[in-house]
Image (cartoon, grey):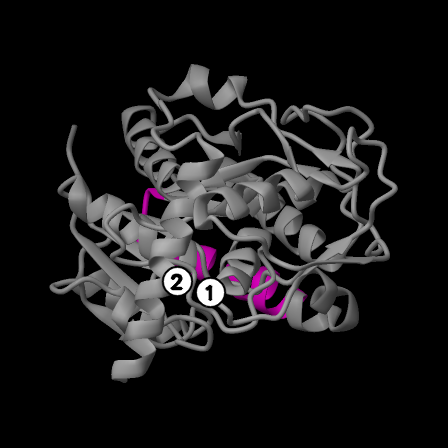
Amino acid sequence: MAKVPVLVTGGAGYIGSHAVLALKDAGWQVAVIDNLTTGFRFAIPEGVPLYEGDIEDGALLARIIADQNIGAVMHFAGSIIVPESVQNPLKYYHNNTAKSRALIAAAVEGGVKHFIFSSTAATYGIPEVSPVTEDSPKQPINPYGMSKLMTETMLADTARAHPINYCALRYFNVAGADPEARTGQSTAGATHLIKVAVEAALGKRSHVGVFGTDFATPDGTGVRDYIHVSDLAAAHVLALDALIEAPDRSLTMNCGYGQGFSVLQVLDAVDRVTNQTIVRQMEGRRAGDPDSLISDNSRIKQALPWVPRYADLDVIVRHALAWERKLTEIRRDT
């Protein structure tokens, strides 16, 4: 299958940098645009051009698309902290929706044929049924989820009006790091549970907060579907293959393993892997946290030849821990 040059937005960030590695490892030509507000130059592999700038800069996007002969966009740039989206909704509608509109417009104007979008299970809100299918009601309960759903809607409308197809991948809880420790979750103050827990295990935090112990789950803590970031990145590359193979077809698919672990089970895994006990501080629920959020991943497995390689909680923790240790060295050396 013909490989087209790919522009990765937010490619210096957590998930974007793993997608860049997956593309590069599979022989694709890649360029990155990132404003480096939450991304890191060290996350970009050697030989991959980095354009430092913003995805709402139409002139810059037009130049990149022309100079690199871009045929596909993988769009990861955006803001992702749910509580912040509640406190500052306009930031999220700007960063995640208005800027995505500018990017989609530049793609259409530049003749880009394929667009892969980093969406989220937050589009479902608090689902009535778990596991969640792609056809479950989309009822976001925060501006983050709504900002992503609005972008999905823009893509669907654009694909009906222009010669471009798209894949929206709705992520569940992304965790872990590149198995070779080439990149990982590097953001200071990150809110991802496994990231927080390995920081605590390495003494970077005094404890891990457990938000809610009265959920309707076996141990009372929230249950989530954790997916290894490298398996997620692999799904993006396969989705791009699928878009090129069937240019008249667009796809919307859940990205998860279809199994859930509670907060306490995750912390138990960190204790196992590190052979120590991290301090757990029980706290009240956060507004809008569902009891359980697990993906029905049958559609992605039917649509793509996607076979997860790292669907093991202890493996996810081990890779996250290895990256956290390397990150300490990187920060010491810079």
**Does residue 101 show up?**
no
Within 10 Å of disc 1 (Cα), the crowding (few <14, some 14-19, many 20+) is some
**Does residue 324 show up?**
yes
- Tags 2 and 1 touching, CB below 8 Å: yes
Highlighted range, magenta: 93-114
For residue 186, side relative to residue 71 (left or right): right
Q: Where is residue 333 in the image (x, y as percent from the top left)?
A: 25, 82
Q: At 33% across and 27% down in the image, what residue appears? A: 242
Residue type marked 1: Leu
Viewer-side residue, 63 vs 304:
304
For residue 104, side relative to residue 11 (left or right): right
Within 10 Å of disc 2 (Cα), the crowding (few <14, some 14-19, many 20+) is many
Question: Quarter of the image containing the C terminus?
Answer: bottom left
Q: Where is residue 33 in the image (x, y as percent from the top left)?
A: 33, 67
Judging by the rendered image, the residue that carries numbered circle 2 is: 324
Q: Taken as a whole, is the magenta stretch helix, strand or loop?
A: helix
Q: At 19% across and 43% down in the image, what residue appears? A: 4
SS of the residue at dot 2? helix
Q: At 68% across and 45% down in the image, what residue appears? A: 122
Q: Which mark is residue 202?
A: 1
Q: Where is residue 316 in the image (x, y as percent from the top left)?
A: 43, 42
Question: Quarter of the image containing the N terminus?
Answer: top left
SS of the residue at dot 1? loop
Q: Is residue 206 magenta?
A: no
- Mark pair 2, 1: CA separation: 8 Å
